[in-house]
């Protein structure tokens, strides 16, 4: 029996009717129409689908849409207005954190969750935090440097 | 020669300003870019495959009636629905849909198109296939025994490259030979023999492959996550027996490939389903399918090496016997025996050589190009073997390499005379970066050690084309057949054109990954994009430059020889105020278009007369040289290994795009470390994969990553790519496992003879009594 | 690889309700619904094809009051079933008095798994490889279950009966796990160590938890040792504990405890490791867990997670 829910995705409320087993990922990609979040595995092993649900990092491929009813969901599309890039997005580009880009949406969301929780992380903390986000292209180097640079910039700005 | 360092994580060296941002960057960080699986089409159907139910069986009958009867199913197709043709790279040994036999667990027996993915999968399960089950033959070494059943009974009748030496289950036999290795071996001071075995591993792009096919009239467009759109186009044309002009392949953003998305494969399956149903049909692989179904994995390899040396470290003879697992079909991997043999020689001075390599069929997943095919495993074996040789003559392994690495004027294994190359320079650079002296002085804890390995990889000179056309406002568009896999090689093309045209790289847009637009290109394989397509873009830009200069000369009433192109204008040298902007020249409506293909460089001459089954690879064109050094810590009690520090020194010629080149090394080294320690496809006794998922097929995570330092030995390489550049994409994973393996051996006192060097294998090696085989 | 037969239930038979209190949850469970907390086992298991998602689900993730960490009357600690691993690994009381539990939670999955995965889900999943099990057992964990007939308390040792099996009835909701008070006399320390090939995103191949209490003279006066992924259920190893009591808690004693753990192990062979290797690792990992617990009991600081800090020791 389909269930009525409301998802607030990047600040916009979407009243939806979903199958109780539908994943948050499929709902956002399909019903909401935001395809930035990627599906790399469908079982929580790659992190390409990561979204924030009420600020928590969530592998949306393995999270039921019905469980996010009434929650604030943030996807990569919500990290900036698409015109002016968020500092993390900018830093990923300038420091070699993006190659094929398939891991990038989840990686950016993961990094956002980290910096929200721990504004001044050590390199080891950064590496630990994004360990659930697999990247085959970059060797993580540019990603780790980008996150560290944004944290340092923020610290410098106080 | 110049040297550029890349500061490691945490280094205080300020980074060079990054002038160039990849044009596809913004869409990738905002999530607005479209990958194939992000496309949806009105009325689309979803495809699913019925795969083989046994790794080896004869098909007695296929009944699709129950599947077709399922509500929501629009079509079920089998071999009966497509032309009866075989395809394949150097050997045409397979069909789109299995007909007489299935030869591995991923063989496609039937395809379904249905309203939903779930219905399509359910229908695929309802296809009734009656088999006569045959014994699986996963043991690729045993398959060459004279009494082993021949897997491809009709092999002799298959179309095949005439240079291949084939015999039943041996798909290709190759011998590289120079001088009398047997006699030289008998005369050596010391002879060392080693035997190494590598398991299969996988490319694992994070994007599972996706395809959508749609027909308009009798033409089909396939959006596909392929690395090789032109190969995909000819594959569809050949297997469906339609002209190439009726097939268009478009590649949306590609989410990584590493070789595993090379070769034509699933485009025609989806196209035929779309044709039969007269609807767009979409196929997106699950992660499990991405492991099991593609005919692409890194081949298992059984490697025996024997080296004869003098006490002062001259290699008088190298013998080798290599057996490679080709799996069920050839695909584009027909050259692997030859490539593996070259890596058993390595970039070393060898007085005499005889290496024999066999590429054998089995009932395993087919092996094909994965980032530097055959090299990482062969290099891992050779480099560990060299450390054993050094130990046998009581020499530091680095010193042995110093004495034997090739330099300008030295000869390759079949007599190729090397031009300027930086093999020795990469060695010294890597040693310096890793702190080898401190290690030799005993400054590391006793559970840590430094291992060193060298390797090489050729450039592939192939034709490639590009157009450069100016827009009316003075911007430009590069139209290329080249394929971007994420490495940034296509994204870097504007740098080359901009310099020639006095424009900024950001003035260029790129039209790429569309077979109806750009000229033919080999695709994103063989690290060849900058090397070949770069030359084409340079030539196309030169043509535009000539046109602009001629137009400028007329306008400015000046001699072409006195003009230059700079800051978006044609201007008089020394008098920049006398100028006309490119926009003014381009805005007249007269098309300004350049086309280029560049001249394909050829490898140096070599002597293959003593070789068997030569495909002409005895001479490496513009070889790239690599030394990797790894500092590892071994947990002796558990066998778990962590790589703490890593140095990568590369001679890839002149580096055109530094951010892009560095990115290839960081990524390649991490992939190499994974293949060294944790990545293997484990199979049951019939060859079925036991770990087709990312929890048990273990890529390295960010927290496993070491500090990686990079140094480029920049040599303006003669007879190479633009500006003296070579490729950069594949070499970074070539010597990685060798370096890690040699480091492990120094801690535990013996070499681990199986790849990957898993914790359990390291533990076994560390704890088995000396001199005893594991 | 042939296509598996359909793992899905038909869409029309699926139901979902969200419970905002324990009674609603239990009522739904009595009517056949399966509770879902973080979903990191239930949904992921279904994606793996382990078992299809149950047709009827009741969301328990927002029931108020079940996500608290609070002292018990007896001086122990009560952990609500919805407490996440992210909370456990950072909670000051857990870090100070139950660091073995923090060792375990800190290495569960990735930070997304830890932000959503709950203690209750970990416990009720009854996996022999789950990480909080060994430290919970060593700290005297008791499950507080609420069913239609009311509340009952079951020691964790009596809860798990095999992989995915427990003595809890399908309509019993776990509301909390309670832990013993840290020993009043003498210093104690706890730890959890697992064998891991990667530093994150692992499933225990072998794991061991230990709680050690030292007398004033440094002699081990009490020891609890439990092993993970080495038998159909996580269980304590009496012989290992006996090998420690009365000793100085040094390397030899820890080694003896490790040997006892290896002897008690009933490991399997699979893609993650052979039975022989697992058995040998049982000795090593148990030894490390014991030594870490002893060091903590002595007041030394061993950073969480101990699996990282004991690498190579
Ligand atoms: C990528 C990944 C990595 C992981 N790594 C680890 C790891 O390293 N170590 C580890 O131990 N686990 C690991 N897990 C498993 C999982 O994350 C943990 O077990 C987690 O604690 C489960 O909590 P949950 O709330 O998500 O459980 P759910 O999936 O919501 O529930 C699990 C089971 O418990 C039942 N249940 C949940 N809550 C209750 C309750 N209060 N009362 C009764 N029954 C209940 C559910 O019905 C279900 O059967 C991993 C999972 C993933 C996806
Ligand atoms: S798609 Fe969700 S973790 Fe991989
Ligand atoms: S950029 Fe390709 S997977 Fe990360």
Image: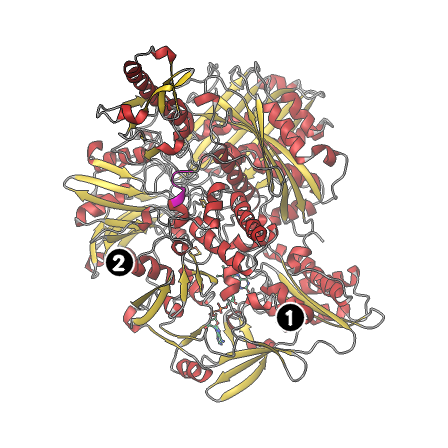
Provide the residue designation for mark 2.
B116
Q: Height in image: A14 above or below C25?
A: above
Residue placed at 49% from the left, 50% from the top?
B697
Q: Which residues lie in the magenta part? A: B22-26
Specify whether residue B334 is in view.
Answer: no
Q: Is residue B17 magenta?
A: no
Q: Which of the labelled discs sits on residue C94, or is there none?
A: 1
Image quadrant where residue B520 sits: top left
Point out the image quarter for the N terminus of chain B.
Answer: top right
Q: Nearer the viewer, residue B273 or B768?
A: B273
Q: Position of residue B351 (x, y in %)?
A: 60, 17
In the visual, does C303 lie left or right of C160? right
* Quadrant position of ligand 3: top left
Q: Is residue B23 magenta?
A: yes
How packed is label 2: few (under 14 Cα within 10 Å), some, or many (20 or more)?
A: some
Image location of residue B149, percent across then percent down: 40, 38
Horizontally, residue B70 falls left or right of residue C228, namely left
**Of helix, strand and loop, which one carries label 2?**
loop
Q: Nearer the viewer, mark 1 or mark 2?
A: 1
């Amino acid at each position: 029996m389909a269930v009525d829910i409301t998802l607030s995705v990047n600040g916009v409320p979407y009243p939806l009717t979903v199958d109780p087993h539908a994943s948050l990922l499929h709902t956002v990609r399909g019903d909401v129409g935001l395809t930035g979040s990627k599906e790399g595995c469908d079982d929580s092993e790659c992190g390409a689908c990561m979204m924030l649900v009420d600020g928590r990092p969530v592998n949306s491929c393995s999270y039921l849409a019905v469980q996010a009813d009434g929650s604030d969901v943030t996807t990569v599309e919500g990290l900036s207005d698409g015109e002016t890039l968020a500092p993390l997005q900018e830093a990923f580009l300038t420091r070699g954190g993006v190659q094929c880009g398939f891991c990038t949406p989840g990686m950016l969301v993961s990094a956002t969750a980290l910096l929200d929780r721990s504004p001044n992380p050590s390199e080891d903390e950064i590496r630990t935090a994004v360990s659930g986000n697999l990247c085959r292209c970059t060797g993580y180097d540019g990603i780790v440097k980008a996150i560290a640079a944004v944290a340092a910039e923020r610290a410098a700005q106080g | 020669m110049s040297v550029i360092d890349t500061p490691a994580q945490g280094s205080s060296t300020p980074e060079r300003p990054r002038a160039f941002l990849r044009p596809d960057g913004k869409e990738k960080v905002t999530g607005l870019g479209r990958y194939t699986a992000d496309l949806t089409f009105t009325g689309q159907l979803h495809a699913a495959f019925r795969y083989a139910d046994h790794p080896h069986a004869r098909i007695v009958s296929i009944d699709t009636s129950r599947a077709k009867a399922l509500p929501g199913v629009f079509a079920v197709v089998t071999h009966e629905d497509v032309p009866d043709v075989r395809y394949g790279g150097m050997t045409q040994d397979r069909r789109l849909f299995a007909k007489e036999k299935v030869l591995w667990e991923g063989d496609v027996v039937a395809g379904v198109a249905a309203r939903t993915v779930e219905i399509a999968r359910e229908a695929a399960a309802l296809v009734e296939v009656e088999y006569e089950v045959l014994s699986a033959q996963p043991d690729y070494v045993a398959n060459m025994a004279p009494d082993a059943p021949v897997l491809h009974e009709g092999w002799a009748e298959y179309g095949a490259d005439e240079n291949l030496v084939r015999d039943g289950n041996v798909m290709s036999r190759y011998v590289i030979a120079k001088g009398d290795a047997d006699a030289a071996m008998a005369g050596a001071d010391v002879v060392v023999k080693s035997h190494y075995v590598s398991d299969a591993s996988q490319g694992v792009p994070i994007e599972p492959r996706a395809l959508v096919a749609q027909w308009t009239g009798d033409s089909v467009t396939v959006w596909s996550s392929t690395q090789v759109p032109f190969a995909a186009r000819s594959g569809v044309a050949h297997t469906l027996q339609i002209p190439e002009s009726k097939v268009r392949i478009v590649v949306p953003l590609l989410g990584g490939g590493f070789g595993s998305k090379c070769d034509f494969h699933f485009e025609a399956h989806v196209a035929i389903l779309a044709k039969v149903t007269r609807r767009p049909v979409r196929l997106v692989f699950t992660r499990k399918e991405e492991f099991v179904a593609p005919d692409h994995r890194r081949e298992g390899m059984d490697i025996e090496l024997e080296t004869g040396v003098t006490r002062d470290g001259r290699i008088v003879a190298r013998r080798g016997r290599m057996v490679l697992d080709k799996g069920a079909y050839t695909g584009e991997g027909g050259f692997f025996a030859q490539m593996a043999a070259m890596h058993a020689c390595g970039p070393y001075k060898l007085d005499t050589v005889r290496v024999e390599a066999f590429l054998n069929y089995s009932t395993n997943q087919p092996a094909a190009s994965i980032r530097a095919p055959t090299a990482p495993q062969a290099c891992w074996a050779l480099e560990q073997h060299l450390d054993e040789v050094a130990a046998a003559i009581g020499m530091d392994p680095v010193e042995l390499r110093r004495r034997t690495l090739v330099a300008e004027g030295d000869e390759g294994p079949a007599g190729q005379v090397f031009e300027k190359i930086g093999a020795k320079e990469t060695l010294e650079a890597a040693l310096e970066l890793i702190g080898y002296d401190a290690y030799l002085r005993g400054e590391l804890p006793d559970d840590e050690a430094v291992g060193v390995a060298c390797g090489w990889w050729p450039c592939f000179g192939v034709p490639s084309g590009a157009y450069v056309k100016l827009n009316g406002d003075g911007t430009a568009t590069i139209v290329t057949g080249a394929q971007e896999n994420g490495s940034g090689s296509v994204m870097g093309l504007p740098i080359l054109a901009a310099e020639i045209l006095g424009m900024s790289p950001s003035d260029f847009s790129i039209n790429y990954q569309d077979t109806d637009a750009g000229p033919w290109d080999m695709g994103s394989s063989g690290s060849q994009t900058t090397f070949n397509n770069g030359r084409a873009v340079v030539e196309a830009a030169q043509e535009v430059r000539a046109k602009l200069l001629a137009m400028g000369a007329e306008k400015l009433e000046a001699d072409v020889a006195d003009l230059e192109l700079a800051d978006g204008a044609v201007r008089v040298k020394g008098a920049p105020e006398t100028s006309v902007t490119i926009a003014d020249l381009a805005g007249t409506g007269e098309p300004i278009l350049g086309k280029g293909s560049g001249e394909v460089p050829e490898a140096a001459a070599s002597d293959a007369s003593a070789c068997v089954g030569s495909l002409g690879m005895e001479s490496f064109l513009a070889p790239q040289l690599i030394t990797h050094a790894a500092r590892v810590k071994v947990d002796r009690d558990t066998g778990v290994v962590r790589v703490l520090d890593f140095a990568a020194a590369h001679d890839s010629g002149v580096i055109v795009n530094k951010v892009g080149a560095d990115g290839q090394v960081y990524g390649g080294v991490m992939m190499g470390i994974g293949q060294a320690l944790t990545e293997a496809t484990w199979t049951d006794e019939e060859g079925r994969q036991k770990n087709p998922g990312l929890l048990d097929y273990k890529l390295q995570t960010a927290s496993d990553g070491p500090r990686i330092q990079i140094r480029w030995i920049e040599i303006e390489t003669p007879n190479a790519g633009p500006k003296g550049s070579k490729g950069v994409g594949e070499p970074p994973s070539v010597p990685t496992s060798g370096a890690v393996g040699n480091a492990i051996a120094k801690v535990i006192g013996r070499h681990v003879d199986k790849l990957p060097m898993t914790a359990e294998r390291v533990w076994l090696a560390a704890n088995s009594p000396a001199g005893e085989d594991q | 690889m042939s296509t598996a037969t359909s793992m899905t239930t038909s869409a029309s038979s699926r139901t979902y309700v969200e419970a905002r209190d324990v009674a609603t949850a239990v009522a739904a469970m009595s009517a056949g619904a399966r509770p879902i907390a973080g979903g990191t086992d239930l949904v992921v298991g279904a994606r793996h094809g382990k078992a299809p998602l149950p047709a009827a689900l009741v969301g328990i993730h927002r029931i108020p009051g079940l996500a608290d960490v609070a002292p018990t009357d007896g001086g122990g600690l009560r952990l609500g079933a919805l407490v996440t691993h992210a909370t456990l690994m950072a909670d000051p009381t857990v870090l100070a008095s139950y660091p073995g539990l923090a060792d375990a939670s800190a290495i569960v999955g990735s930070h997304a798994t830890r932000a959503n995965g709950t203690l209750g889900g970990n416990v009720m999943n009854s996996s022999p490889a789950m990480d909080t099990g060994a430290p919970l057992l060593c700290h005297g964990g008791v499950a507080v279950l609420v069913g239609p007939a009311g509340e009952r308390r079951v020691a964790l040792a009596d809860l798990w009966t095999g992989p995915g099996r427990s003595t809890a009835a399908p309509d019993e909701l776990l509301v909390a796990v309670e832990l013993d008070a840290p020993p009043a006399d003498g210093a104690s320390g706890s730890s959890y160590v697992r064998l891991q090939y990667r530093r994150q995103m692992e499933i225990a191949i072998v794991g061991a938890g230990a709680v050690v209490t030292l007398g004033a003279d440094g002699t081990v006066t009490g020891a609890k040792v439990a092993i993970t992924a080495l038998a159909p259920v996580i269980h304590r190893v009496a012989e290992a504990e006996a090998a420690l009591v009365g000793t100085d808690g040094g390397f030899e004693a820890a080694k003896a405890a490790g040997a006892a753990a290896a002897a008690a192990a009933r490991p399997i062979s699979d893609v993650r490791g052979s039975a022989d290797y697992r058995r040998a690792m049982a000795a090593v990992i148990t030894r490390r867990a014991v030594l870490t617990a002893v060091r903590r009991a002595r007041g030394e600081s061993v950073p969480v997670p101990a699996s990282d800090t004991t690498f190579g020791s």
